[in-house]
Image (cartoon, grey):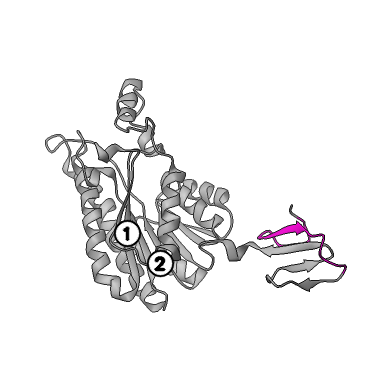
Amino acid sequence: MWHSRFRPWQMIFQSSEAGNKGSNDARGQLQIAGWIVVDLECLMRLTGKVAIITGGGSGIGKAIALAFVREGAKVVIAGRDRKKLDRAAAEIGGECLAISADVSSAGDVQKLMGAAIDKFKRINVLVNNAAVLLPGTAESLSEEDFDQTFDINVKGLWLMSRAVLPHMRASNGGGSIINIASVLSMVGARNRVAYSASKGAVMAMTKAMALDHAAENIRVNCIAPGIVATEMVEKFNTDENARKQRVALHPMGRFGRPAEIASAAVFLASDESAWTTGSVVTIDGGYSAQ
């Protein structure tokens, strides 16, 4: 049970063995007047880490930020919509800093890095999640939409990674860069020519960056989700028949959940994945197995 005398990250258990005076038992647990205080920080997987998450105001990005904070990390969420970021930061709680930034702008990226360092003094994890999905074929897609897709989905990833690498290199512990790719990095889909191409680039960049920075203990991996129930996806599901067709692409019979992608991100951000780099973690309900 919880007790108000102790800090929120300490779990309190009643002990029949503890006496009336405070003591430390052989397990390093503090016993105070019949209570055992277990410091949960030692159980959290991301304690002491600072993470930047782009596209952190909603969907997969917000789910990753929530999961990171639950595991003890301090987080910086970035995006273009200030109101959405502020709402997300209030929901995330903990030590969460919200910064309005466009990842396709080198100036905005530098301001974001500066704010993160000023606040938390270091960066251990970068999640390149910001993306747009603008539908179209090679013939129907406008040049403006094609450029915007690559500016955010690919150039933004490069700008963020370039900016964070010196900070990770300065840390003796290295760091972890997690890129959010897509099942469409590996398979095609109708009316998604720019998005598919951009996510294919994300997967290729992940592997190239992993090789470039492995010796510096900077790990670079990507997660390739199938269709996940987010705000970005829902705007394409207003037609019920189209929605059912998209669900049917997944042998498990449903869309993914943002929290399911966040679980993989926690693993890749943690020391549990210390020997994992250049990997593509596919989480798609069987989509790509067909």
Residue shown at 23%/47% (left/top)?
185
What range is drawn magenta here? 3-20
Q: Can residue 18 be seen in this view?
A: yes
Residue under numbered circle 2? 113
Quarter of the picture holding the C terminus: top left
Mark 2 or 1, which is nearer the eye?
A: 1
Q: Is residue 212 left or right of residue 84?
A: left
Judged from this view, the residue extending furthest toward the right is 20
Residue under numbered circle 1? 221
**At numbered mark 1, what does the secondary structure look like: helix, strand or loop?**
strand
- In this picture, is 14 found above or below 83? below
- 259 or 19, which is in the foreground? 19
Q: Where is residue 235 in the image (x, y as percent from the top left)?
A: 36, 32
Q: Where is residue 228 in the image (x, y as percent from the top left)?
A: 38, 39
Q: Is the magenta stretch mostly helix, strand or loop?
A: loop
Compare marks 2 and 1 and give the one earlier in the sequence.
2
Q: Where is residue 173 in the image (x, y as percent from the top left)?
A: 42, 75
Q: Is residue 134 visible?
A: no
Q: In this view, does 49 lie to the left or right of 261?
A: right
